Image (cartoon, rainbow, N blue to C red):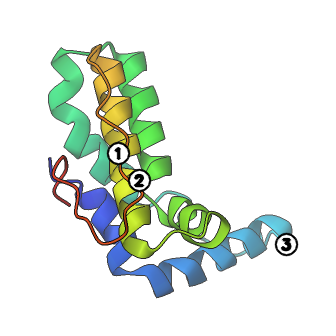
Amino acid sequence: AQLAVLDHAYAMERLMRRLLVASMETRIHPDPAAERSKRSDRLELAKSILAPLSTALDPDSLERLTHAVTALSGIEALVALEDVCGLSPDDAREISAWAIETLIRAALGDQPPDAPSRSVGKPSSRVVL
């Protein structure tokens, strides 16, 4: 499955990190005069990617899954996996894809995929991103 929403965070990592810092600063020091969109294209992209599941999931489950995929596919997950867990970008991407795939399978009642190997440099055959 193509996870374009995950590609976005990795393709624009430097910019996304700056936006994350700016977003955190805005939460700490709110500026009522500043008109910023609090939603990103990432949520809309996740909604469109998961839309085909609307016939298999009830609306609440689909919304919960959409929010979870949005959280796992952004710069926040990238920062946690690379900076906190110490993973390489490739390993972080593989873990993110595995986590998203696991959530989708769980939501559909399928068995989760095998956990990704910790071998650096081995591409995953399960998900093409």
Give the amino acid type for the residue marked by disc 1 in the picture: Trp
Give the amino acid type for the residue marked by disc 3 in the picture: His
Mark carried by residue 98 = 1
Q: Earlier in the sequence, mark 3 or mark 1?
A: 3
User: Up-down: is 96 above or below 66?
Assistant: below
Which marked residue is nearer to the observer: mark 3 or mark 1?
Answer: 1
The image shows a total of numbered marks equal to 3
| Residue sitting at x 18%, y 46% | 126
The location of residue 89, given as percent across then percent down, is 42, 74
User: Is residue 41 visible in the rendered structure shown here?
Assistant: no
Please give the residue where the numbered disc 3 appears in the rendered image. Answer: 29
User: Up-down: is 37 above or below 60?
Assistant: below
Q: Is residue 53 left or right of residue 70?
A: left
| Residue sitting at x 46%, y 28% | 64
Cα distance between the residues tagged 2 and 1: 5 Å
User: Up-down: is 21 above or below 4?
Assistant: below
| Residue sitting at x 29%, y 67% | 7
User: Up-down: is 71 above or below 104?
Assistant: below
Quadrant housing the C terminus:
bottom left
Give the amino acid type for the residue marked by disc 2 in the picture: Ile
Q: Tell me if mark 3 has few (under 14), some (14-19) or many (20+) residues whose alpha carbon lies within 10 angstroms of its own.
A: few
Please give the residue where the numbered disc 2 appears in the rendered image. Answer: 95
Cα distance between the residues tagged 3 and 2: 33 Å
